[in-house]
Image: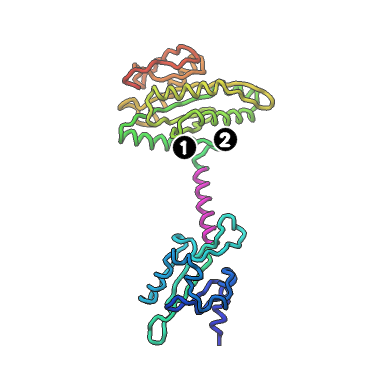
Amino acid sequence: MIDTLQLVDNLSIGTIVVNRDMEVVFWNRWMEDHSHVLREQILGKVLTEEFPALKQKGFPWKVQTVFRLGNFAFFSQKLHQYLFEFENTKYFRPYLPSMQQSVVLVPLKGSDGTVEHVCVSIFDVTDAVLYQQQLIDSKRKVEELSKTDELTQTNNRRHLITRLNEELSIHQRSGCVLSFILLDVDNFKDVNDQQGHVCGDYVLRELSGILKSGIRQYDILGRYGGEEFAIVVPGAGISEALIIAERLRSGVEKFTFECDNNKFNISISLGLASTHGDLLRTPEELFKMADKCLYRAKAAGRNCVVAPDEKDDYTSKDSIPCSGPRDVLNKISPASS
C-alpha cells in the first residue's frame, strides 16, 4: 500500500495543513527546503504568526471561508505574485528575485462531511511567468522593429503614414490644426560619391539625431525613404511649423560631420504643408503639397524652407519665389497661420 504521507512529503510542491485555529499540523519537505523552517520548528505554531505577511494578503480570511463554505480558494500569481516570499534560486534570479507562486486552498473533510483542516498547496510557477514575459518582450520587440527604420532608428515609412492618419483623424474630429514637414539632404549623392556609402549611412544616423533634438516631444519623425525624412507636427499651423523647420535647417547647417578623419558639412531643404482649414484632409494631399514646396526649395538654391503662401490653392503648378537659400520663405497670412 502506498504511504500517502511519504508521497505528499516528497512532492515538488509546497504542502501545508492547518486546523481551524490556523495551527500547522503538516509541513512537507518542500516547505522546509524553501522556507528554511524545519518541520519540528513550526508544527503546532500559528502559521500567520510565523509568517505575518500572510495577513496583508488576506490569507486568514480565505482560510476561514474554506472552513465555512467547504469550497476551494485560490491565490493567483497575476494578482499576488507570491504568497510566501521565498528566494528564487534559479538562473534568472536577477529578473525575478522572488519565487512566483500560485496557491490552492483545499478543504479536508472528516467522516461527517465537515471541514476539519485546510490543505495549502504552493506551486512554483516562476518558469511559466518568465516564459510568458519573454513572449511579451519578444512580441514587443517584433512590433517595434516593424515600426522602426533600422538605420536611423526613427519611424519607418509605413508607421509614419499610420501615425499621420491617426493625427488627421484627430484633426477631422476636433478641428485641431496639423502641419507636415518633408525634408531632403542636399546633394546627398555627392556625400556617397566623395565620402563613401559607409559615411553616407553615418550622415543619416547623425542627421536623425539632430532632427530628434530639434522637434517637440510629441512631433512624429520618420524616414520616408533614402535621404528623405518627414515630420508630422500636431497642433501647429504653418507659422509654428516654419519655426521648427528653420530650427532644423539651421541645426544641420551648423553641425560638422566627421567620418574617416574627414570633416564636412551638409544642408537640408524643407517643404511644408498644413491642414489649412478644410483643405488637405488626406496623407496623399499633405505629401503632395509638401513635396511641391520641397521641390521649390531645391530649385531656389537648396538649404532653405518653403511653405505654401496665401495664394497657393494646393494644386497650382506655379512656383513660389524663393528669396534666398538661408531665409525662411513666404510670409504667412493670418488665415493660414
Q: Is residue 222 above or below residue 92?
A: above
Q: Residues within 10 Å of mark 1 (few under 14, many from 20)?
A: some
Q: Residues within 10 Å of mark 2 (few under 14, many from 20)?
A: few
Q: Position of residue 52 (x, y in %)?
A: 48, 67
Identify the residue shown where x is 45% and y is 11%: 323
Q: Name the amino acid, label 2.
A: Leu
Location of residue 57 (image quadrant) = bottom left
The main secondary structure of the magenta stretch is helix
Q: CA distance from mark 2 to mark 1?
A: 15 Å
Coloring scheme used: rainbow
Q: Is residue 281 above or below residue 61?
A: above
Nearest the eye: 210 or 135: 210
Q: Position of residue 122 (x, y in %)?
A: 50, 69
**Res 325 label:** none
Secondary structure of the residue carrying tag 2 is loop
Residue identified by numbered label 1: 158
Residue mark closest to the camera, 2 vs 1: 2
Identify the residue shown where x is 34% and y is 21%: 336
The magenta stretch is 127-144
Q: Is residue 214 above or below residue 320?
A: below
Q: Position of residue 93 (x, y in %)?
A: 59, 58
Residue identified by numbered label 2: 151
